[in-house]
Image (tube, rainbow, N blue to C red):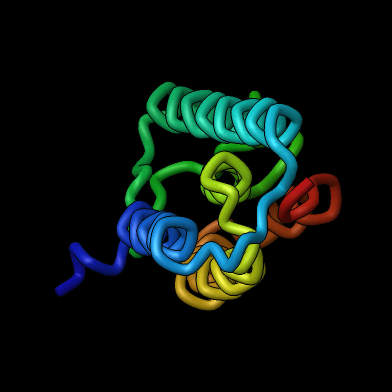
Amino acid sequence: MKWIDLPPVWLLAMIALAWAQATWLPLGLWFGGAWSDFLGGLLVGGGLILMVLAVHEMRKARTTVIPHRDADRLVQSGIFSRSRNPIYLGDLLVLAGLILRFDAVLALPLVPVFLWILEKRFVIPEENRLRRKFRADFARYCQKTRRWI
């Protein structure tokens, strides 16, 4: 069951819910056409870029990308100098962008729900592991780099 408790699985579930809402329960609501498609595309693209940059930095540092595993190194370079959680931020951007693209107005609350799930299931446990393993280095990193943006 651990394989199912991964952020991409949760992201796919949220995307499926948003798509289902837009397909079967639109209630005549929509975001407004071209601008929402454009903004949605920018958000999805930006989210994917964040994820790729983060995975690249983690691979370069030779540490794990998999949540629930202990990191070998504390990555603070590249995109990690701007956000402590760029992959999760990318997940949120992808979800928000697809909600706009699908015109899934009623699915907008999925974004804060997904944020809550990410924090409770992944971010806080990961940060606790990093705090125990890297102590002072992680404390300094937290002081200079925000959790999200």
Q: Residue at x 76, y 36 (%)?
A: 82
Q: Is residue 7 visible?
A: no
Q: Is residue 114 visible?
A: yes
Q: Is residue 59 above or below residue 139?
A: above
At 40% from the left and 65% from the top, the residue drawn is 24
| 29 relative to 1, above or below | above
Picture quarter with the N terminus:
bottom left
Residue 100 picture location, percent across and down: 63, 45
* The residue positioned farthest toward the front in the image shown: 28
Residue furthest to the right:
144
The reply, left or right, for residue 36 in relation to residue 110 is right
Instruction: Estimate the x, y position of residue 52 in percent, counting from the top left.
Output: 47, 26
Give the residue at the far left of this rendering.
Answer: 1
Tell me what residue is drawn at x 64 percent, y 71 percent: 109
Left of 8 or right of it: where is 106?
A: right
Give whichever of 2, 32 is nearer the camera. 32
Foreground residue among 5 and 9: 9
* Viewer-proximal residue among 29 and 41: 29
Depth check: 140 or 14 in front? 14
Residue 136, located in which quarter of the rendered image? bottom right
- The quarter of the picture where residue 106 lies is bottom right
**Does 47 sit left or right of 81 as displayed?**
left
